Amino acid sequence: MPSTAITANRLLDGAVIYLTADGDWTERLADAAVADGKDAEAALLAVAEAQARAGTVIGPYAFKVDIAEGFPTPLGQREAIRTLGPSVRTDLGYQTAPN
């Protein structure tokens, strides 16, 4: 069974964010909490959904990841695109930021 991570959008500015192990949010998938198993996924999703009800984030959901070189890598095309930023005007998206 693949591992999962939790993503949402920050309500303040719409940025793609990922839930961390301490219940905070980050824009870096590399810092996201990774759940192995349905119980761990449900626990992380419960934290994210509580924050959605509080008005911090919108639309949290779990997505499948693989661990490559110690970091989560999205398995789906949608999530791969979300980690990179907009697919149009790539001169303005996350792609322009130095690593």
Image (cartoon, rainbow, N blue to C red):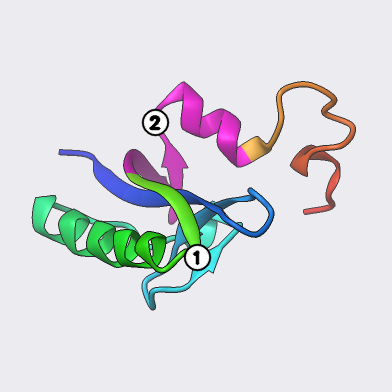
Q: Quadrant of residue 13?
A: bottom right
> Mark 1: which amino acid?
Thr
Given the image, on which type of amino acid does mark 2 rest?
Leu
Q: Residues within 10 Å of mark 1 (few under 14, many from 20)?
A: some
Give the percent coordinates (x, y) of residue 14: 64, 48
Please name the residue shown 82% across and 28% down the image.
90
The residue under label 1 is 56
Can residue 69 be seen here? The reply is no
Does label 2 or label 1 sit earlier along the sequence?
A: 1
Q: Position of residue 22 (x, y in %)?
A: 38, 78
Is 67 contained in the magenta span?
yes
Q: Compared to 64, does 39 lie above or below?
A: below
Cα–Cα span, label 2 and label 1: 26 Å
Q: Is the Cβ of the residue at disc 2 closer than 8 Å to that at disc 1?
A: no
Q: Which mark is residue 75?
A: 2
Which of pointers 2 and 1 indicates the residue nearer the eye? 1
The residue segment tinted magenta is: 62-83
Q: Residue furthest bottom?
A: 22
Image position of 1 (left or right of 71): left
